[in-house]
Every structure is written in structure tokens, then in C-alpha cells.
Image (cartoon, helix red, strand yellow):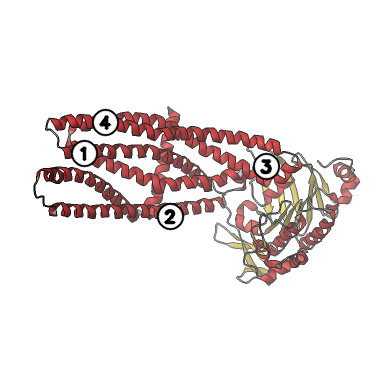
Amino acid sequence: MENKNKKKSSKIKTIKRLLGYVTSTYKLQLFVVLVSIIISALVGVAGIEFIKYLIDDFITPFLTSQNPDYTALFNVIMIMAFVYLVGVIATYIYNRLMINISQGILNKIRKQLFNHMQKLPIRYFDSRPHGEIMSTYTNDVDTLRQMLSQSIPQVFSACVSMVTILVSMLTTNVYLTLVVIAMVVVMIFVSKYLGGNSSRFFVKQQEDIGKIDGYIEEMMEGQKVVKVFNYEEESKNKFDELNEALCESNTKANMYANILMPCIMNIGNLGYVLVAVIGGMLSVNGILTIGSIAAFLQFVKAFTNPLGQVSQQMNSIVMALAGAERIFELIDEEVEIDEGYVTLVNAKIENGKIRETEERTGVWAWKHPHKDGRITYTRLRGQVEFENVQFGYEENKRILHDITLTAKEGQKVSFVGATGAGKTTITNLINRFYDIQEGKIRYDRINIRKIKKDDLRRSLGMVLQDTSLFTGTIKDNIRYGKLNASDEEVIEAAKLSNADKFIRNLPHGYDTVITGNGEGLSQGQRQLLSIARAALNNPPVLILDEATSSIDTRTEKIVQEGMDKLMKGRTVFVIAHRLSTIKNSDLIMVLDHGRIIERGNHNELIAKKGTYYGLYTGAIEID
């Protein structure tokens, strides 16, 4: 019972939020829509009343008249034609406006979804299948479109029609109206049973669609792995399992939905027959006119048909509300918290003092406002310190223990160790992709929690093992490192990274359009573009996360040359499986299960003949 109340409360909140989108921007349009729907419904009732008037006041008298005068009939027909024209215009207006309103709301929701997604922490994307997130943008938003543009107007129109028709039926004959109401009660019970089951399975269908979308997205991204490991049969079996679940929920949802309308219509037809029989008896006894009976029979149809429409549209509304809940869940996800107040600014050094400037001097400084109103500046040098850092992706499960290290300005610090030892996690903490539970991380002796995240990340460059390229030109992809960079700066960065030569050999050089994360480019070429992107950013601190582990030795030499140029004069953190690439590191950290077990330069660690010596000589496997 409590669970049902929670669900009901959740639905009410969702409806209120959706109404908020409408009333915040489209109050006038919504008012016009409501008026147009009422006019359209009243025109429908007027048309049925006209049948009664036509039969009783014109057709029946004409049957006994020797010289009937058709002038009055013509005038009445012209008036009704005008009324119907008004009804057509009103119907067009509310349908047209509802399309504008629904598309405007969906446009706003999609923007809100995407803008909010940019503020979410990396943790959110690491813990959810990307296909399910995509399903929110597509399937869930589409169910909202159908509800806003079709279901809601139809339900409101049906309700207005039913109220006006009920009033008209009561004024015509109370006893016949009671017969219709009895039939409607039966229809409501049938509709509640069939519609409730249908709605339940439609909601499950949307959830199953999200799961199958997530799985398809994973399989598409991992096709090479699927092929290499002959995983085709297993992937098909898993897909079949998800597809069967979707098929089952879809079948049951549509089964109940498809039998709902025939049941409602047949109950309505039964009511129609009863009204015709009882109405005929009343007419024989002179209680009702022929016109009244004819009109009342039309009222019965006009009253029961909207009820069937409402029952059917409820499925769309329930699906849309379930989709809206998932949309609002994403929108309500807690954004990345940024309590930082220290910012990165262009600076000039005059007489040994740092001064902020609007010019691009190539010198950066941390602008540090204090509580007493003072502002101090610290030159950005790239010194990073970890002090007794402890961290776990889950609060009660630590994976880094007492990490203490200092990377001085211009030093190359390398991390080695088995997979899962914590190497990548350490670099993620420098970027504040995740926040530590205990200890401190300082950047130029400033606690990184005090530095605004955008400014912190602007001062850091990353070259990852998995390169992310986007649809667009080569030039645009490099320019991700600095969006306002000139073409000359882009080319200079490409030259620094050794990417310029292969780019110029492409069909359109820097204007060559790439798609699908760099299809047509080798892994080494993609990596060179990633290095060029980092070079354009020109950061004082650089993170290289196994940047050459997935390319061949020949290409590695070219990439390594590019990285060597990029590393010059910077503080660099390197994660590498190939120990030959880190021999010249100033400091090498050997990690094991989240702890630093050895530290020193290459010669010092070799002399210790410990874990690093075993890894370097091959006595110990790195994984």
C-alpha cells in the first residue's frame, strides 16, 4: 500500500513538473487551445441537437405538407454549415497550437537534458550503460511528444464532449440517460482492468527498450572484441534473452490495448440497442418524438466513443509519465560540485611581482581571493603533491592507501604496476574526476579543492590510451585543445606532435572530415592527433595514460618523439606498460594494490633489485 502511495505521489509530481513547462512559456497558447477544444466539443453536440431539430421541425411536418416551404430549412442548414466551419477552424487551431507547444517543450527538455549532462560527474557515466542514457533522449522523449501533441488534447476534448453530451441527454430523457450511465459504469470497470494491465506492461516495455538499447550500443562499440574472441554466439544469446523480454512485455501490452477498444465498443453497442428499444417504446407511447430518439442514439455513440478513446490514450499517458520520470531522474542527478574559488589568469611579472593582465603573455598565475579581501597571485609552475591520500570509488571500499608523492616542476613521474594497482586512479584524482576521502592534493601548494575545476583542468593536458575523436575536420578535432586557436596555432601543434606529415598526405589535409571516432586513421595517427590536441592546449602539467600501449613499435617511435617534444619543460605523469619508455623518468613509483611499494629513478630501483627490477628484467609479469 505504501509503495502504491509513493508511486501515485511520484506520478503527481511528474505531472506538476510537466505542467510547469507548459504554464511557464505557453499560457496564452494553452488558453487558446482550451477554448478551441471547448468550441469544437460544443459544435459536435450542436450537430446532434440539429438532427433532432431537423427531424421534428422540418422533415416530419414536410411529410404531411402539400406545399412545403424550404426557405427556413435552407437558412437553418446554412447556419449549421457556419457552425461546423467554426468547429473545423477550432479543431485546426488547437491541433496546430498543440504541435507548437509540444515541440517547444520537447526542445526545452532536450536542451535541459544535454546541458545538465555536461555538468554531471564522470562517476555517473562510469556507472551506467550509455545506451540507456541514449534511450532517455530518444524513446522517453518521443513518448512525451505523443502525449503532449495527441493524448492530452484528445482526453480533454473527450471529457468536454462527454460532459456536454450528458447534460443534453438529461434534458432529453432522464430514464434513457440512466441506461447509458449503467453501461458506462460497466465500461469503466472493463477499461480499468484491461487498461491497468496494458499500462503496466507498456511501462515495462519502455524499461526493456532502454536495456536492449544499452546492450546494442555496447556490442557496436565492442565489435572487434566480439570478433576476436568469437563471442558472436554468446552475444546473440544475450540479445535474444533481452529481445524475448521486450517481445513479451510488448505482446502483453498490445494484447490488452488491442482488446480494450473492441470491448468498450461492444458494450457501447449493447447500450445503443437498449436505448433504441426503450426509446421506441417511449415513442409509441408519445413520450418522445422521433427526432429526440434519433438524436439520443447519436448521443449514445458520441458519449461512448470518447470513453473508448480516453481508455486507449491512457496507455500513452502512462508510458509518457514513466518516460518523464526517467527524464527527470537524469535532470535531477546531482551535478559535479565545484566549491573552488581560485582561478587561472593571464599574468605579467614586473619587478618580481605578479600582475593580472588581459594580454596573452604565456605566463599563467593562480588568482587567490582571501576572506579579508586580499588577492594574492601564485605563478603556475606545475608542482603536484599528494599527502596521505586515501580514495575509494565506493565510500566503504578504499583502493588507494596513504599515497604520498611530490612531482616538482618539470619532473617526469611514472607509475608502474599490475592492472588495478591504482595508476589511472591517481591521475583521475589530479583532474578531480573523483574527489578523495582523506588526505590532500596540492597544486603549486594550493589545495586543489580550492581551485575551480574548469581552471584546474585547463592547466592539465591528457593523452589517453583510448583516443576520442569527433565527427568534423582534422583541424576541428585538434582545436578541441583550444577552441579559439588560429589555423597557424593548430598547424604548429601538429608539427610539434609529429602529426603534420601524415595530415598533409590526407586527401584534404587539415580540412579532411573524419567520422566514427577516426575511421580510416590508424591507431598511431589517432594518437598523434590526441597529442597535437594536448600540445595546442600547452599545459604545464601533462598526463600520459598508457598512450603508446596499443600501437606498434615503429609507430611508437614516431609517437614517442612527438610526446618527448610535448613533455619538454612540463611536469609529466606517465602510466606505461612498456618500461623502456620510462627509463629516463625523474621518479618512478611502483604500485601494488593501491600502495606505493617502491620509489626512485631507474638506476636506484634497479640497484634495489626489488619489484621494479623483477618487472624490468622480466622475472615478474607486469599483469
Q: Which residue is mark 4?
A: 273
Tell me if mark 4 has few (under 14), some (14-19) or many (20+) residues whose alpha carbon lies within 10 angstroms of its own.
some
**Cβ atoms at labels 3 and 2 below 8 Å apart:** no
Mark 1, secondary structure of its residue: helix
Nearer the camera: disc 1 or disc 3: 1
Q: Which residue is mark 2?
A: 104
Q: Nearer the N terminus, badge 2 or badge 1?
A: 2
Q: Which residue is mark 3?
A: 391
Nearer the camera: disc 2 or disc 4: 4
Quarter of the image where the C terminus is located: top right
Separation of marks 1 and 3 at Cα, in angstroms: 80 Å
Q: Is residue 487 visible?
A: yes
Q: Which residue is mark 1?
A: 294
Q: Nearer the N terminus, badge 1 or badge 4?
A: 4
Separation of marks 1 and 4 at Cα, in angstroms: 12 Å
Nearer the camera: disc 2 or disc 1: 1
Residue 75: give x, y in percent of width and height: 16, 55
The residue type indicated by label 3 comes to Phe
Q: Nearer the N terminus, badge 3 or badge 2?
A: 2
Q: In the depicted view, which residue is nearer to us: 281 or 41?
A: 281
Residue 584: give x, y in percent of width and height: 85, 55
Q: Nearer the N terminus, badge 3 or badge 4?
A: 4
The residue type indicated by label 4 comes to Val
